[in-house]
Amino acid sequence: MRVFMETIRRVAGKFKMDGRTHSGAALCERVAPRRHAIDCARRCSCSIELPVGITGKHRQHPPPPADGTDRSAACAAFCTDIMDSPSRLSGLTIALHWTVAAGVLGLIALGLYMVQREAWPLYHLHKSIGLLVFCAIIVRVLWRLKNGLPKPVRVFSRMEHRAAVFAHALLLLATLAMPLTGMLYSAASGHGFGIFGATLVSENHDPASSAVVPRDAQLSDGGQTAHGVIGYLLLALIALHVGGAMKHHFLDRDRTLLRMLGVSPKGAAQTIARDKV
Ligand code: HEM
Ligand code: HEM
């Protein structure tokens, strides 16, 4: 998974200009201000010194605070909101995380309720919201492929770090699998699906009795089982994940949860204000 993400990132970092292939860093020193900002934020993991000879906006990059306060806080706050860094996550990462989290938790509750109570009118609502959340999930997975998973807020043991990466990758895969299996089941069972009245896959009726009939009974059964099983697995994963977040906050007392809530590190604003004087 890591190798796959790294390859995607490397490829995405290359681009063509004037008939030649450049790396993101080369462009940083030449033209595009947006790319420049992205590169600046990428360098802001702050254990890395800024390369000599960087021009333009990098000149204004704050020097390491003389009093030894956390340099990464100053750097990250100075850099743009575009990329994630160890001390703060981009607005997009935070917005996508909480949108998908709320959507998925709501859909699990709605899905379990409607199946147990056989509340048929709620099926359309579940499918419509599920498709909208699917769009956010796609954007999020693409963003993770481009940006990688957030770097840890502090040094963890290798085991702990690997477990976190594995759990996050599983969460991403499971959130992707849920809408896909839901769509598979709905299409193959002949019930179809759409978004709030706009049909995407129509119902499949038997011409003689006009009853809904499966398009493919085997695929329908497979899709239904997978949607249910992955749904329960996802719920268990989320419980572990939330437990992990609480452990970081209340036992380890680190910034993992605060960073995902968008709370700025203490001292960042003061350091920047002082550097600008
Ligand atoms: C992140 C998105 C989604 C989540 C988390 C989710 C979750 C769930 C859950 C937990 C159930 C109950 C499963 C059971 O008790 O067997 C369920 C049922 C169902 N979901 Fe979803 N769902 C999502 C998206 C979708 C989508 C996009 C569709 C279709 C377009 C869909 C169609 C269905 C259907 C038809 C059922 C009823 C299954 C049955 O009767 O056994 N879901 N969903
Ligand atoms: C109340 C519920 C939740 C809390 C308190 C919470 C908390 C967090 C925190 C603190 C992180 C950052 C971890 C780090 O920096 O290493 C994180 C990341 C993550 N969370 Fe959650 N989370 C919640 C719900 C969910 C749900 C429902 C999902 C999936 C459906 C989810 C999926 C992820 C993923 C994939 C990441 C990796 C980073 C990313 O892709 O944004 N979380 N979460």
Image (cartoon, rainbow, N blue to C red):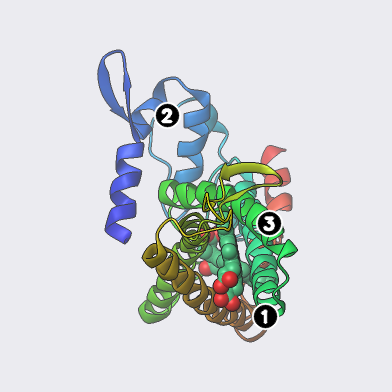
Judged left or right of residue 203, residue 145 is left
Residue tagged 2 = 28
Question: Can you give x and y, in whole percent of width and height, for residue 262 in the image?
Answer: 69, 57
Farthest residue, direction front: 208
Establish if 53 lies above or below 120: above
Query: Sequence order check: which comes first, mark 3 or mark 1?
Result: 1
Q: Residue at x 62, y 54 (%)?
A: 133
For residue 84, say whether it is visible.
Answer: no
Amino acid type indicated by mark 3: His
Q: Residue at x 30, y 39 (%)?
A: 11
Q: CA distance from mark 2 to mark 3?
A: 48 Å
Of the two numbered discs 2 and 3 in the rendering, the one whose residue sits closer to the viewer: 3
Secondary element type, mark 2 = helix
Instruction: Give the quadrant of ligand 1.
Output: bottom right
Mark 1 residue crowding within 10 angstroms, few (<14) / some (14–19) / many (20+): few
Q: CA distance from mark 2 to mark 1?
A: 56 Å
Q: Residue at x 45, y 38 (%)?
A: 39
Of the two numbered discs 2 and 1 in the rendering, the one whose residue sits closer to the viewer: 1
Question: Can you give x and y, in whole percent of width and height, for residue 160 in the image?
Answer: 43, 79
Amino acid type indicated by mark 2: Cys
| Label 1 CB sits under 8 Å from any ligand 1 atom | yes
Residue tagged 1 = 116
Q: Which mark is residue 124?
A: 3
Secondary element type, mark 1 = helix
For residue 156, say whether it is visible.
Answer: yes
Which of the two residues, 61 or 263, is positioned nearer the viewer here? 263
Query: Sequence order check: which comes first, mark 2 or mark 3?
Result: 2
Mark 3 residue crowding within 10 angstroms, few (<14) / some (14–19) / many (20+): some
Question: Can you give x and y, in whole percent of width and height, for residue 246 in the image?
Answer: 64, 80
